[in-house]
Amino acid sequence: MFLKNYLVIIPGIILAFVLYTLSQGFNNIIGIELLGYNKSPISTAMIAILLGIFFGNMFKVRDSFQKGLDFTREYILKLGIICLGIQLKPFEFLNFGKIAIPLIIICIISVLIVIKLLIKKLKIPTRMAYLISIGSTVCGTTAIMATAPVIKATKNEVSYAIANITLFGILSMLIYPYFADFYFDSKPLLIGLFLGTSIHETSQVAAAGLIYEQQFNSPETLNIATVTKLIRNTFLIIMIPLFALLYNRGQTKEKNYSILKIFPYFVLGFIAMIILRNIGDQFFLLSYDDNWNDVIDIIKFMSKIFLTMAMAAIGLSTNLKDIKSMGYKPFIVGFIAMLTVGIVCIITIESYLKFFI
């Protein structure tokens, strides 16, 4: 029975890996063979998610693949993010972390105010608006699923909110890397902060960072975007009790949430990988220079494989019919939430540049 539970995830994982391989192949054919570049200007992560969306909506994904795809989206994604930590040093983490926290707080407050106004203007159900707002400001689907029980959201409200966040998250994931490079004049710190703060899902931020790295040869931007998003994820610990208080105020004193359950533990793995990198640099770099650098390169490579597989799995699980059936009002709320986060993020970064640099 124990072995059987693990065997059922293998087909989905293999399917995600096959799409990763196809994406890498298409990337090389189009970018190198057809366009003549030494390195393809097209992102493998972008191709993976687009291929996933295409195949997932053109053909019904069999149930035998579903558990493996869920595993890939949930755990292989987190493993890929953990492996990203090998590229960072603690002082880098602390350096842009202290900039990211005020930026994240300002964006969260701004979106909450805007959505509060939209609830009355568009007559959106309060629970739906809460789900969209926390999904837009903290960590996408994870935040929505964690918040739903404490505000007693219905299944339809949860589905609508997830579809909403997925749609606008994918759009921002595909557009923002190019927009940010243009607007912030190819500055890794500013672009990484923008991507990590303005895009909804952890996986989408990782994909956007990966797209930017592959397009503009900037691993630093991927690192900054990832760290910013992981810091942003920890705000879930504050936001869940806050939303429970705001919604249930005067209705019930029951607490349906647990800090231990909602804490994103993979962040600890990411930090552990940063520490491992820095311990290794201190003890192995002088004596075992080539071997230690080889280990670092392997972990970096595995991280990109894991993240691209997760992008393929997300694409395969994105149902365009569900998104189409949302109705226009939640669509408007999601769109305005996306714009609000993006605009406030830009204004805050510009203010930081003006007054602190």
Image: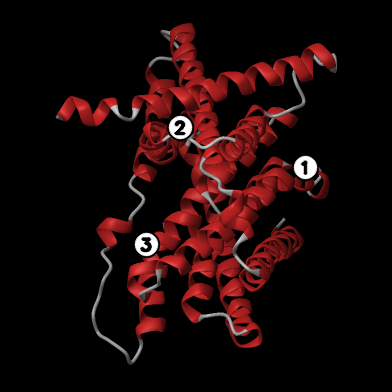
Q: Is residue 294 left or right of residue 99?
A: left
Q: Residue furthest bottom?
A: 250
Give the mark, 2 or 3, whose residue is nearer the N terminus: 2
Q: Residues within 10 Å of mark 1 (few under 14, many from 20)?
A: some
User: Image quarter for residue 44?
Assistant: top right
Residue for point 51% across, 47% down: 202
The tag on residue 80 is 2
The tag on residue 303 is none
Locate residue 122, reporting x and y percent: 65, 83
Q: How many marks?
A: 3
Locate residue 114, reporting x and y percent: 63, 78
Give the mark, 1 or 2, whose residue is nearer the N terminus: 2
Specify the color scheme.
Answer: secondary structure
| Residue corresponding to mark 3 | 146
Residue for point 40% across, 40% down: 70
User: Image quarter for residue 46?
Assistant: top right
The C terminus: image quadrant: bottom right
Locate residue 184, reporting x and y percent: 78, 48
| Residue corresponding to mark 1 | 178
Amino acid type at circle 2 is Gly
Query: Considering the numbered disc 1 on the image, is that residue within a helix, a strand or a loop?
Result: helix
Amino acid type at circle 1 is Tyr
